[in-house]
Amino acid sequence: MSMATRTDSQSPAPHAADSHDLIRVHGARENNLKDVSIELPKRRLTVFTGVSGSGKSSLVFNTIAAESQRLINETYSAFVQGFMPTLARPEVDVLDGLTTAIIVDQQRMGADPRSTVGTATDANAMLRILFSRLGTPHIGPPSAYAFNVPSVRASGAITVERGARKAVKATFTRTGGMCTRCEGRGTVSDIDLTQLYDDSKSLAEGAFTIPGWKSDSFWTVRVYAESGFLDPNKPIRKFTKKEMQDFLYREPTKVKVEGVNLTYEGLIPKIQKSFLSKDKEALQPHIRAFVERAVTFTTCPECDGTRLSEGARSSRIGKISIADACAMQISDLAEWVRGLDQPSVAPLLTALQQTLDSFVEIGLGYLALDRPSGTLSGGEAQRVKMIRHLGSSLTDVTYVFDEPTAGLHPHDISRMNDLLLRLRDKGNTVLVVEHKPQTIAIADHVVDLGPGAGTAGGTVCFEGTVEGLRAGGTVTGRHLDDRAAVKETVRKPTGTLEIRGATAHNLRDVDVDIPLGVLAVVTGVAGSGKSSLVHGSIPAGEGVVSVDQGAIKGSRRSNPATYTGLLDPIRKAFAQANGVKPALFSANSEGACPTCNGAGVVYTDLAMMAGVASTCEECEGKRFQASVLGYHLGGRDISEVLAMSVTEAEEFFGAGEARTPAAHRILGRLADVGLGYVSLGQPLTTLSGGERQRLKLATHMAEKGGVYVLDEPTTGLHLADVEQLLGLLDRLVDSGKSVIVVEHHPAVMAHADWIIDLGPGAGHDGGQIVFEGTPADLVADRSTLTGEHLAAYVGS
């Protein structure tokens, strides 16, 4: 008889597999990173911080997460890779110890009118199955409850190729839930024809009132007048029925005008293509004002905004239809689902229950499933994306978050911190790009990038613990314990903006007077009704400049010079100095290098592999023809001017031969919002979230208006940048403007002259004014959640 016994009392040697507990990055050079090398501990919470534009996203998203995703994609077959986004290998020497990365970023969810919170999170898919099994009357499969699926009917002969070929008569039907009137959008749009033309005039007399449509314009007005379909000398109101049909709705038709082949198209489709298909934010102010005047969106009268067909609305479980379920606040819907006791669909109810409870747990219980996903703020969109990961059983995964506390009240930040710690404690690596001190404080490891932004950043200033950061002397370390004091003296209002009976969304018949001529802050927990009150009751228009959180749209051809309109005065100044036309100084027009079409790089598409971008050999990346670069202004050519930073350009266009007041004014506004380090020709796609927000603010500052409405302007801003923003808000108020800010940041609240606090909770638990007064009164009162957190922040 033998028995194995262990005689050695020493611990076994560590297993080789346990040695891979670090993510190693060596020589990272993406965007502005300067040969960065760091080692990150796995299964820990690491926070990346630093001023806006210091290189945080370049390191976390464009290097670590991008390489992880690229390596995972390469495990699929070439056929499958052809359908996936192609990713190039990041500019880095060594990336070692990577695990599967799940990216939860702040990219806005698709603003397609048919995309809702329910369709984006699979909650709608489960609800549709539930109603198709339990709904009475039974109207069909899950597709019958889907507002994105139209009903289809077809019949005809089909040939079956089996043995003797024979034709068989067949019919096909599919029951969809789409409302036929609004096609699942919930709203119908009408174009106000009186805003397009004056029907008392003829085309020859200049009937069009559309911006930019001059009577001698060859491509617009003259193609109508000389098409042969219309009488150019007859007043529009006297057009026959056929002429009116041709004028407004005719399909694109080739016509000849003065020997030139042109396309004639009805006015309505032409306006929809030229104005309505573009991002409203990217339009020039006078064109945006025209679009807002000319187009009205009204709730669909047939489905009453539910997007669903009559059949889908008639099928119910108890007294609830799928339209009612989607319109409920999610916290209420979770209670309703919990009350359904149907063993036949028990697994489905459990899965739906978990999804809805995740919404509540993450602080989004105030949303409804029919909320259009394009209306969610960046912070809300990011938390909606987190929902599918909360109950996941996966471990040893790298979760990458981009400012998960954006748009959160201090009360909600502690809840978000708990979720981040829970993901870490399950054995995952959590990487977070963050500015809020509350979240930095819970980190196991901190990486501080800087010291400045843009070319002045891109290096690691500190790596270690939070205590080490506080004592480290970096910009972040110095500002980490900053506490703004509550204003002792506040400005006196010069008037009031009266809001009476506001009922948008969850507001409960709110009456409030917002003081003018001061810095007024509207605050409250996420979902309490702040944006509904401000944007719903103070429409952007005459005298009101509204800067919301909508994302900037822009391709790699767009840059700060084109987005702000700065390029126009620069082109004119170059043209005047050299006696040539302005179009030569645009890389998107006549001056473009013919080889790369003004892109500066030549792209080679390699199918399922990442495309290669190589610098154009003809223009050496300068984007312009050689002949254009021969023209100078103040000793510089156009490519050298676009390579300047805002600060350099402000000096260049401020005095001397290159003095251009129009350009200098725009550059002054860019410097005011803290973008002095950004180069004029830097593609918009390479700007960080905070930089884009400030670029948008600088553009809107040009608009004439006495009231500025800003929606969370501190999003994406470092603690040091918030000080600069407060200085800008003070300058706006001191110049005679009224500034109304929707904000959660305690430093902005403490700096306010007047605070309006909404609550007490979110969704139907909010929508009321719970406090109005000065910050000092709010701190002394402490009757609201905001008051408690502000008092703790200022240390009173």
Image: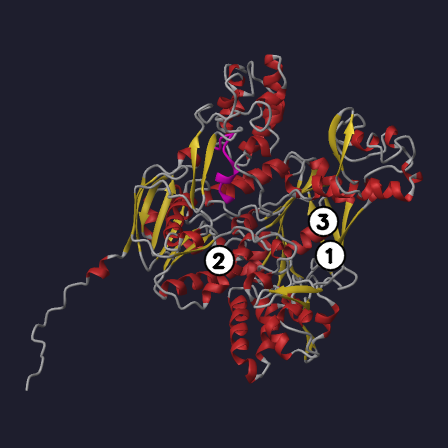
Circle 3 packing at 10 Å, graded few (<14), some (14-19), many (20+), is some
Camera-side residue of 297 and 234: 234
The three-letter code of the residue at mark 3 reads Ile
Give the number of the mark in front: 3 or 2: 3
Q: Main secondary structure of the magenta part?
A: loop
Q: Which type of secondary structure does the marked residue at label 2 adopt? A: helix
CB within 8 Å, label 1 to label 3? no
Q: Is residue 588 magenta?
A: no
Tell whether position 685 is magenta: yes
Q: Give the residue pinned by disc 2.
A: 792
Looking at the image, tell me whether mark 1 or mark 3 is earlier in sequence order.
1
The foreground one among 103 and 237 is: 237
Q: Residue 296: give x, y in percent of width and height.
A: 77, 49
Question: How far apart are labels 1 and 2 at the CA level?
Answer: 45 Å
Residue at 77% across, 27% down:
217
| Above/below status of 775 relative to 643 | below
Q: Residue furthest bottom?
A: 1
Compared with 626, 714 (above or below) is below
Please tell me which residue lies in front, 506 or 481.
Answer: 506
Residues drawn in magenta:
678-689
Q: Which residue is mark 1?
A: 187
The residue mark sitting in front, 1 or 3, is 1
Residue found farthest to the right: 238
Q: Which mark is residue 538?
A: 3
Q: Viewed as shown, does residue 147 lie left or right of 55?
A: right
Q: Earlier in the sequence, mark 3 or mark 2?
A: 3
Mark 1 or 2, nearer chain start = 1
- On-image quarter of the N terminus: bottom left
